[in-house]
Amino acid sequence: MCGIVGYIGENQAAPILLEGLSKLEYRGYDSAGIAVFNNNKIEVAKAKGRLAILSEKTDGGKSVHGTMGIGHTRWATHGEPSDVNSHPHLSNSGRFAVVHNGIIENYISLKKKLMDNGVEFISETDTEVIAHLFEHYYNGDIIETMIKVLNRVEGSYALGVLCSDYPDQFIAVRKASPMIVGLGENENFIASDVTAILKHTRNIYYLEDNEIVVLKKDSVKIYNADKEEIKKEVFTVDWDVSAAEKGGYEHFMMKEIEEQPKALRDTINPRIKNGKIVLDDISLTTEDIKNINKIYIVACGSAYHVGVVGKYVIEKMCRIPVEVQVASEFRYCDPIIGKNDLVIVISQSGETADTLAALREAKDHGARILSIVNVVGSAIANASDDVIYTWAGPEIAVATTKAYSTQLAVIYLIAAYMAEKLGMLTSGEYAKLVSDIEALPDQVAEILKSKEDVQYLASKFFNCHSIFFIGRNLDYAVSLEGSLKLKEISYIHSEAYAAGELKHGTISLIEDGTLVIALATGRDLFDKTVSNVKEVKARGAVVMGVTTEEHDNMEDVADYVVKIPATNEMLLPSLTVIPLQLFGYYVASLKGCDIDKPRNLAKSVTVE
Ligand code: G6P
């Protein structure tokens, strides 16, 4: 979950590398470094801490000369964040410089062997073995050396490698970690994702596992593990550059919150034609849907929370049993799963290590995989039988908002699509459901118009030490996300509880002034949740109720009330989550937190 950029061309490399890395800081921000080929040798600059420190140290890159280089922004796994553990890592002679994203699982045995051969290690990282392996196997041919190194390492990697014997080229490879190649005019790039190079080119190659790429300023050649050249199709990215820029917002997170109506429209509208949901992207036939025995939803973090909504929605609409599980558990639980089961895998990045491993586990059991992914061509998308893309555009803030919302929208589309195929809805119900889904983007926009109301509430509670979220069924599912949003960016302790479960222990934590955010949007369970609100009020809690305009008696029990528009009960999570995202954002902002880059987190989690 580190970020990598590489450049070769006619311009000074270091400022381009730093600028590219600034777009990848969401992948890690413990330390950063660059290696640039200059005067027949490799010059390295590194700094612990944010990229800004490295930038200052190198005068925005101006003090490091040369037109070919590699750069890295790190999320520490092996060895604390420090200058010495930062990438790039050099071989002892200084001939090779390596940047790496991923984990070399057998690095300890490799390190021992290399040390027995007299190699000196200076860092605690797994990556350093790669630099030394290059030196060890080097026979004057960089591609052959790369192949030998790849034969020795186990694990996941995206690698960028400079060799001082090759002043006009550098080399890269990936396996189970992302890397794309950017194709420019007299300049070429590698990067962990397109946002890092979008300013320079929209033409890219997606690399498959273990494809080795050799970049010169005027050519890019790709080889397989037998050193045979491979031809690839150029993919043109149609994102607007501004999609990956803050565009006047103080934080990406607020920009992305505000982008939700558009992201939802982009995700929903192309899939509704003449009042019908059209999922051209998937090959699942009506027969296949009828034969589904059970659905598993597997994901991590907020994507898992979408899965919790999905369980309620799909079970209710399709009457197919759904089990939702976090990927890190699913992959090791020896799941009882077979060829008549459908596994829905949800991931913004398409590269989360546990989610990818869970997908493979399910596939090994013969299950069919339908993934919901935001990043085109990502590992999870490639490994799935069917993919439905969320068209959220690049999401930069570590705390997800628009990806979560678009994933929810896709869940609704899948549920309604399958329910219709299964004959679970009358034509009238189906038509109304489809038009309610289509109305969601405007309803989200409507809620966002009163964001100052939520800001006011945040100003009352940003000093709280602990905040509880409660709700039942779908409201509980959204509580999970509201609580995560708040804690991950504001560092306030928070828990989400099924409202009826609170009294089995956690209510003992409620004391005078504890804030409880009670979600009571659904019709059937409104009164039940109101009873739970009364229970916490009786123990001194201050309650902020979130409900729809249909309910006018929340005011009688709660101290503060946030209203959202009414819609089909199943779709309410799309609306309920908006004030919760805003609340988390404003609380974190009032506390002066680093909202887009919360401590200890990274957006793409490519380690177990
Ligand atoms: C990280 C992010 C979360 C995200 C989770 C899963 O923890 O901070 O926002 O939900 O990873 O990521 P994915 O890319 O698989 O959706």
Image (cartoon, grey):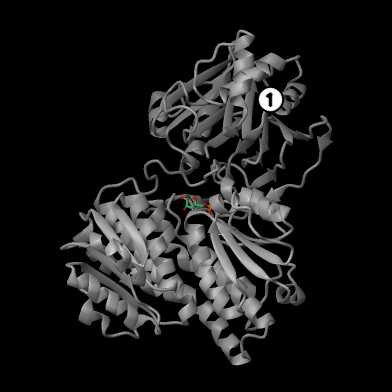
**Residue at left 58%, top 12%?**
92
**Residue at left 62%, top 44%?**
201
Look at the image and tell me whether residue 458 can be seen.
no
Q: Nearer the viewer, residue 74 or 395?
A: 74
Quadrant in which residue 8 is drawn: top right
Left or right, 124 with respect to 368, comes to: left
User: Dot 1: within a 10 Å radius of its alpha carbon, few (fewer than 14), some, or many (20 or more) residues?
Assistant: many
List x then y, in percent, for residue 509.
24, 59
78 vs 514: above or below: above
21 vs 569: above or below: above
**Residue at left 40%, top 84%?**
524
Left or right, 381 with respect to 25, comes to: right
Image quadrant containing the C terminus: top right
Query: Which amino acid is tagged 1?
Result: Gln
For disc 1, the marked residue is 169
List x then y, in percent, for residue 116.
62, 10
List x then y, in percent, for residue 590.
24, 53
109 vs 30: above or below: above
As drawn, the residue found furthest toward the top would be 118
Question: Which type of secondary structure does the marked residue at label 1 adopt?
Answer: loop
Q: Nearer the viewer, residue 196 or 525?
A: 525
Q: Nearer the viewer, residue 240 or 332?
A: 332
Quadrant in which residue 461 is drawn: bottom left
Left or right, 374 with respect to 582, comes to: right
List x then y, in percent, for residue 208.
72, 42
